[in-house]
Image (tube, rainbow, N blue to C red):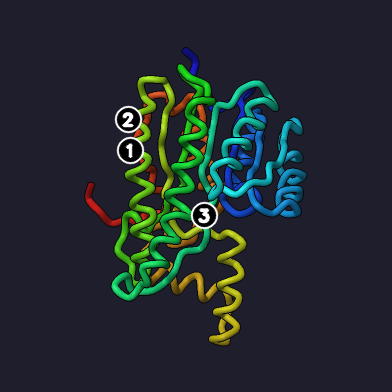
Amino acid sequence: MTLGIRLDGRTALVTGGGSGLGLAMAEALHAQGAAVAVLGRTKAKLDAAERQIAAVGDGRVRSVVADVNEDDAVADALRQVQEWQGRLDIVINCAAPLLAVSPLAEADEAVVSEALNAKTVGYHRVARAALPLIEKGGTGRIINVAGMAAHVLVPNIGVAAVVNGAVVALTSYLAAEAAPHGVLVNGISPGMTLTQVWHDRHAATAKAKNITPEQVRDGMVENLGIRLGRWGRPEEIAAAALFLASDLSSYVTGQTLQVDGGLGKSVI
């Protein structure tokens, strides 16, 4: 068996693929030969993403408008993608809202419940619908994008820690259940990554404090103790997704890969 990064002949679905990390991952997979569908709720954003992704590959790209919080919509979207290319190999769960920032003990119960439903339950819904359709015996992959909050203690992100910790557990259990069918399930926990959302946040903070966005970013790097001394780039997170989607990861399952520039400080 020759292992490689190319994904020729394979079909991928990326939820939350209209922007940010989801878009970067969709671009990376398509550049390596995969037919890629991006799923989201906003048609205009998906149409723009479709054009951007098509520019880096052979043009086998489509968008699917659906809400991952709706069972029927998710099942229909996955069937559409499978029928489009006659197969479904790779599913990346990346659709998630910004989560509340507050001490966990002060977070309203409804906020925690809503956050779990929006991310963890949504990921489960997509994975559950995908497993009967996904290719068995070697190319089938499910990749769940969690977050650094699952691994590090940072003040005021307890809600995100609970939600992303649940995603890590979901990944481990799905991997165990999917392994007999030859489907690999893994996760990625990105660290601080310069998506457009963070660019906008830094600009707003910089304006309020009368400093530059670069100073805002550098201050966060110092406060968090990121070992590589900088923020990550979306394409660096996408590279990890590409590895997990490819044959190079053929003996990896049930793992959540921390791609965080050395933010995590645990020994094991």
> Which amino acid type is marked by label 1?
Ser
Amino acid tagged 3: Ala
Q: Which residue is mark 2?
A: 176
- The answer for how far apart the CA atoms under marks 1 and 2 are is 6 Å
Residue drawn at the location 77% of the way across and 44% of the way down: 51
| Quarter occupied by residue 187 | top left
Query: Which of disc 3 and disc 2 is earlier in sequence?
Result: 3
Direction from residue 102 to residue 46 in the image, left or right: right
User: Neighbour class for label 2 at 10 Å: few (<14), some, many (≥20)?
Assistant: some
Question: How far apart, in angstroms, are the residues tagged by discs 2 and 3?
Answer: 24 Å
163 left or right of 70 in image? left
> Closer to the camera, 160 or 204?
160
What label sits on residue 232 in the rendered view? Answer: none
Give the residue at x 54% y 31%.
90
Left or right: 227 with respect to 203? left
| Relative to 215, residue 122 above or below | above
Disc 1 to disc 2: CB gap under 8 Å: yes
Residue 200 on image: x %, y %: 61, 70
At 67% from the left and 25% from the top, the residue drawn is 83
Residue to which mark 1 is pinned? 172
Image-quadrant location for residue 124: top left
